[in-house]
Image (cartoon, helix red, strand yellow):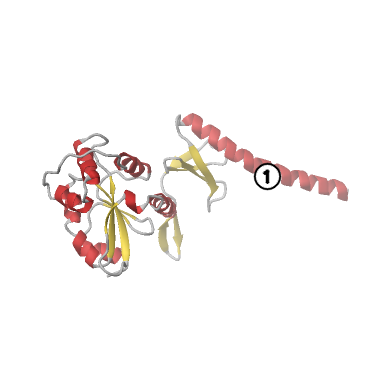
Amino acid sequence: MKLLGRVFLVVVLLSSAIVCFADNKLITENISKAIPGLIIKDIQSTQIKGMFQVESDSGEILFSSSDGRYFFTGDMYSTENDKLKNLSETKREVARISKINTIPNDQKIVFPAEGEQKGSITVFTDIDCGYCRKLHKEVPELNAMGVKVSYLAYPRAGINSESYKKYVSVWCADDKLTAMTKAKNGQPLDVKVCANPVADQYNLGRKIGISGTPAIILEDGTLIPGYINAAKIGQALGIL
């Protein structure tokens, strides 16, 4: 009887392990059939028993039942120490900054900090965006504050638009910083074409959820959608 009991226990444990594996397979199969073209990148358990977090290759997050028959989109929150915390956004922040950090500095247009660097921001920008231009006027103040500003391209009108072509001309200029400032001031640029990362950066922005400009990303991956002034950026970085 003891032997039978042990055998039964082993079978139960093995069955449980198989079920866990089978759940991931079912989630992938059922959700992929329901949403053609969706590529599931990762499946993880959540703090809620029986609910799984499903991440697509675009970074979109779904929450699914253990078999993928029921799922919903949206953010998951927790109430820890009487404070509201967006668990989904925390995960997006990590993914966002990890992708941005793979881009070498020579693929960005960088306005360096003056003196000691105390912080940095990455900005997805559009040449013709009014608030992007307003933010650019505050770059000298940010640099003086010790903040490095790195620009990535996000021409809102899309690839091959006029804004796209202007960014290419900025990128291909002998002096990118001067060309960027001229473009942001609405001054004409010499039209130039060369190998450039503009399309790649635009596509990256779309993949990590950028939908408008300026999109300011802090060092921890926090996304600030839209314009805020230099002082508020300094506060967000903990400098002021």
Residue annotated with mark 1: 17
The C terminus - image quarter: bottom left
Secondary structure of the residue carrying tag 1 is helix
| Residue 149: % across, % down | 27, 58
Q: Name the quadrant containing residue 78.
A: bottom left
**In front of the other: 117 or 13:** 117
In this view of the protein, can residue 210 be seen by the observer?
Answer: yes
Q: Please indicate whether residue 49 sits to the left or right of residue 135 in the image.
A: right
Q: Name the quadrant containing residue 119.
A: bottom left
Give, as a three-letter code, the residue at label 1.
Answer: Ala
Q: Is residue 36 above or below residue 153?
A: above
Q: Please indicate whether residue 175 sits to the left or right of residue 217 in the image.
A: left
Residue at the extreme front of the image, as rendered: 174
Residue at the extreme left of the image, as rendered: 187
| Residue 44: % across, % down | 54, 47
| Residue 220: % across, % down | 38, 59
Residue at image position (58%, 35%) is: 26
| Residue 195: % across, % down | 30, 39
Q: Within 10 Å of the Cα at label 1, are there few (<14), some (14-19), or many (20+) other Cα atoms? A: few
Q: Is residue 31 above or below residue 88?
A: above
How many numbered badges does the structure rendering display? 1
In this view of the protein, can residue 126 be seen by the observer?
Answer: no
Residue at image position (45%, 34%) is: 38
